[in-house]
């Protein structure tokens, strides 16, 4: 048996700073026709350790992709910061900024859109290496290795995107992301467009690659089962704010926030009639507009437990237990 | 006791394409009983939407069909276009994945629903308006009188889907075909819509055929399930029997490919290979090149047939259905986990 290195109480070593820290991030978008700005992300904090997957859950429009894009430096936050190993790329000189950015890669939902239709599979994967000054034979050798690793053999090397299936294209995207030898990959709905049997292959591949390389993932999906499958920790978002976060086991098995509960209850279950005992609670209404979010708790207009206080006071993000936070005034009483 | 409302028998469908005639559906047979719910599952391209369009008589002109589609005993394939048009809305209605493609952006939803009603029944404008508002109320649209004056783009995705359901049900059809009605909406809205379909089906006695790629969604609503693979029905039985003891290796494989809340980073069963194109089908069982249980005899043609212990309610298209004991999602009367389920064979990543 190996000794587990989780420290005893009192002698706990100071935890290393997380690989990625998102600190009180605020991203607003210009509203249409002089309306209020869209408060896509409104004070979100999170952290991702090395070799760890953090899952982001929330309905569409909750700000998941916006957080992903801010992490990648594709948009500049209105306030707050994204720090990679303690450094904020926006405050670094260009060279250093590019170096930090190289260590964060992305795999998007649409496997097709991200690939250049004129490039062969091999060229697509070797391209990110051009910038690193690696010589051509070495680039091609590395591309071949990566393609091999993601399960695409020699038969696929010279194909172009239109000659590949959706799952194969997503493998190319993963190989391409790996080419820069990143520490973190942002997966934004990376398996959402795939049929289930292909989705299973890609999820297996992501788990294996993480175990082999100590990669970290920011894993974004609207599908809670997929997020729960891959993540070590999860953060639940609603209208640009964190409702709850913690270890996946805790959040999924003992949801503390009414919104997390509602999401889990809405999850369709492939179970026979006699195992569907409890009647699920269906959340009423639609998500309000992020241009005019409700006062107080953003979830209050749909919350079955809302009281007067919820309309007046924004619930603070509180620590329920170490590593577990919740933003509901009444989390303990539910 | 039960009465068969829709009886699809040996339905085959061919499309005339630039590369010649391709067969899209092969020998598809299934029934929908009155006042019941049937799910149809299968991966993309398996032929789910084409089956639905065939039932509604809405196939593209380049399509050719053989077999029978009996609705209340009458073969729809022998009906004239006019007769079919009359049946749509009052006999069989359909709702689609993307409501925007079915709703007209230049008319209010009230106008569109009234219009559908007036095309089916002799009602005055005023009666049509009243009935429309009642229907909008029944599908859970708040403030229906005001909402009926709004245009489709003014509604949220979930509300639009409700308006679609109202439009489909206004002619009081006996069968509602819903093709992926929740795929484009959020999970909380999906739960609302599934509840609504369940309630409406129960209260009005409407039969529902729900098409989905998600076995969980089908399990939420449907009593029976039909599994489609590469244009063929590979399994059909009650939802409970399917989840307990799937008879086809494809069905079992699909169940174990899907991550669930409890599968935490455990290896998922990735069915190797991929769905064949309609013009590159293997001989015999179409799942054979991907099947872990294939034997040489699987290359022989195989029909959908009842399995031994499943009773007359369990049909499978697999030569080895009687001898295989495939893992379902139930184990010892509880949800199966990766630890307690018999090992599913299969390739890795
Ligand atoms: N207009 C068309 N012309 C040629 N082939 C078509 C056409 N429409 C559908 N097909 C083919 O018919 C087969 C069945 O398609 P269908 O739309 O019924 O699949 P489906 O099961 O509904 O898939 P999805 O889950 O993606 O909606 C597929 O191979 C598809 O490529
Ligand atoms: N470029 C943009 N311009 C204006 N609004 C945007 C833009 N990107 C996102 N939004 C808005 O920000 C909110 C959060 O969006 P997003 O991060 O894409 O959510 P999610 O990925 O969780 O679905 C939504 O209301 C969305 O419409
Ligand atoms: S703070 Fe109030 S409205 Fe918000 S989740 Fe808690 S109980 Fe519901
Ligand atoms: Mg998104
Ligand atoms: Mg379809």
Image (cartoon, coloured by chain):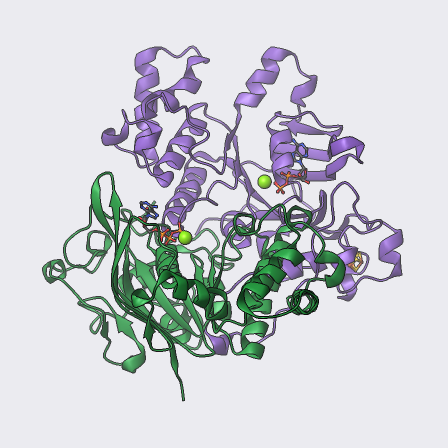
Chain colours: A purple, B green
Depicted A15 relative to depicted B145: above or below: above
Depicted B176 relative to depicted A225: above or below: below
Image-based side of A271 in relation to A139, left or right:
right
Q: Position of residue A233 (x, y in %)?
A: 59, 47
Seen from the viewer's position, the closer of residues B57 and A120 is: B57
Residue A249 found in image quarter: bottom right
Which residue occupies 62% across, 32% down?
A20
Q: Residue furthest bottom?
A: B1
Depicted B47 relative to depicted A78: above or below: below
Which residue occupies 32% across, 79% down?
B313
Depicted B179 relative to depicted A183: above or below: below
Q: Position of residue A169 (x, y in %)?
A: 37, 34
Q: Position of residue B235 (x, y in %)?
A: 30, 67
Seen from the viewer's position, the closer of residues A184 and B167 is: B167
Asked if residue B263 shows in the view, the reply is yes
Q: Position of residue A277 (x, y in %)?
A: 56, 76
Image-based side of A11 in relation to A115, left or right:
right
Which residue occupies 23% across, 48% down?
B22
Seen from the viewer's position, the closer of residues A133 and A7 is: A133
Q: Quadrant of the C terminus of chain A?
A: bottom right
């Amino acid at each position: 048996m190996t000794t587990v290195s989780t420290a005893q109480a009192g002698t706990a070593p100071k935890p290393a700073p997380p690989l990625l820290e998102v600190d009180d991030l605020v991203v607003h978008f210009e509203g249409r026709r002089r309306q209020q700005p869209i408060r896509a992300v409104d004070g979100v904090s999170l952290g991702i350790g090395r070799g760890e997957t953090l899952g982001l859950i929330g309905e569409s429009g909750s700000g998941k992709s916006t957080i992903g894009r801010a992490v990648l430096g594709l948009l500049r936050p209105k306030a707050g910061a994204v720090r990679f190993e303690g450094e904020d790329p926006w405050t670094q000189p260009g060279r250093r900024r590019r170096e930090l950015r190289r260590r964060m890669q992305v795999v998007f939902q649409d496997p097709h859109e991200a690939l250049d239709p004129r490039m062969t599979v091999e060229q697509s994967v070797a391209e990110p290496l051009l910038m690193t000054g690696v010589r051509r034979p070495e680039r091609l050798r590395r591309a071949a290795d990566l393609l091999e690793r993601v399960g695409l053999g020699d038969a696929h090397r010279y194909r172009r995107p239109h000659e590949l299936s959706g799952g194969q294209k997503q493998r190319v995207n993963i190989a391409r992301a790996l080419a820069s030898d990143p520490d973190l990959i942002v997966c934004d709905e990376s398996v959402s467009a795939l049929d289930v049997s292909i989705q299973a292959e890609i999820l297996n591949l992501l788990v294996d690659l993480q175990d082999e390389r100590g990669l970290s993932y920011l894993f974004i999906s609207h599908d809670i089962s997929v997020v729960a499958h891959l993540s070590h920790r999860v953060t639940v978002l609603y209208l640009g704010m964190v409702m709850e976060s913690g270890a996946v086991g805790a959040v999924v098995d003992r949801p503390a926030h009414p919104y997390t509960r509602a999401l889990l209850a809405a999850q369709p279950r492939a179970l026979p009639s006699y195992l569907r005992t409890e009647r699920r609670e269906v959340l009423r209404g639609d998500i309000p507009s992020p241009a005019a979010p409700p006062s107080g708790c953003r979830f209050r207009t749909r919350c079955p437990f809302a009281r007067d206080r919820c309309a007046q006071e924004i619930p603070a993000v509180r620590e329920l237990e170490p590593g577990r936070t919740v933003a509901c005034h009444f989390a303990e009483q539910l | 006791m039960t009465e068969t409302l829709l009886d699809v028998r040996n339905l085959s469908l061919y499309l005339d394409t630039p590369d010649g005639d391709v067969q899209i559906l092969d020998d598809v047979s299934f029934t929908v009983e009155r006042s019941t719910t049937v799910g149809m599952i299968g991966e993309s391209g398996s032929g789910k939407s084409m089956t639905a369009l065939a039932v509604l008589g809405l196939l593209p002109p380049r399509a050719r069909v053989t077999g029978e589609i009996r609705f209340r005993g009458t073969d729809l394939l022998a009906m004239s276009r006019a007769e079919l048009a009359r049946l749509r809305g009052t006999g069989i209605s359909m709702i689609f994945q993307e409501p925007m493609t079915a709703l007209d952006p230049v008319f209010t939803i009230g106008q569109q629903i009234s219009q559908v009603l007036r095309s089916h029944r002799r009602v005055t404008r005023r009666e049509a308006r009243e009935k429309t508002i009642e229907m909008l109320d029944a599908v859970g649209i708040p403030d229906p009188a005001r909402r009926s004056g709004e245009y489709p783009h003014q509604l949220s995705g979930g509300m639009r889907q409700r308006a679609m359901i109202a439009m489909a049900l206004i002619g009081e059809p006996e069968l509602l075909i819903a093709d992926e009605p929740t795929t484009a909406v959020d999970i909380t809205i999906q739960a609302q819509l599934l509840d609504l379909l369940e309630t409406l089906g129960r209260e009005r006695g409407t039969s529902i055929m729900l098409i989905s790629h998600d076995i969980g969604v089908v399990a939420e609503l449907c009593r029976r399930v039909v599994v489609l693979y590469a244009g063929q029905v590979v399994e059909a039985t009650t939802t409970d029997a399917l989840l307990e003891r799937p008879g086809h290796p494809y069905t079992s494989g699909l169940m174990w490919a899907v991550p669930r809340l409890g599968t935490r980073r455990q290896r998922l069963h990735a069915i190797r290979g991929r769905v064949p194109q309609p013009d590159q089908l293997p001989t015999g069982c179409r799942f054979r090149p991907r099947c872990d249980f294939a034997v040489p005899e699987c290359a022989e043609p195989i029909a959908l047939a009842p399995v031994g212990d499943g009773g007359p309610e369990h049909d499978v298209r697999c030569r080895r259905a009687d001898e295989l004991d495939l893992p379902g999602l139930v184990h010892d009367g509880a949800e199966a986990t990766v630890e307690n389920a018999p090992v599913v064979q299969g390739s890795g990543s």
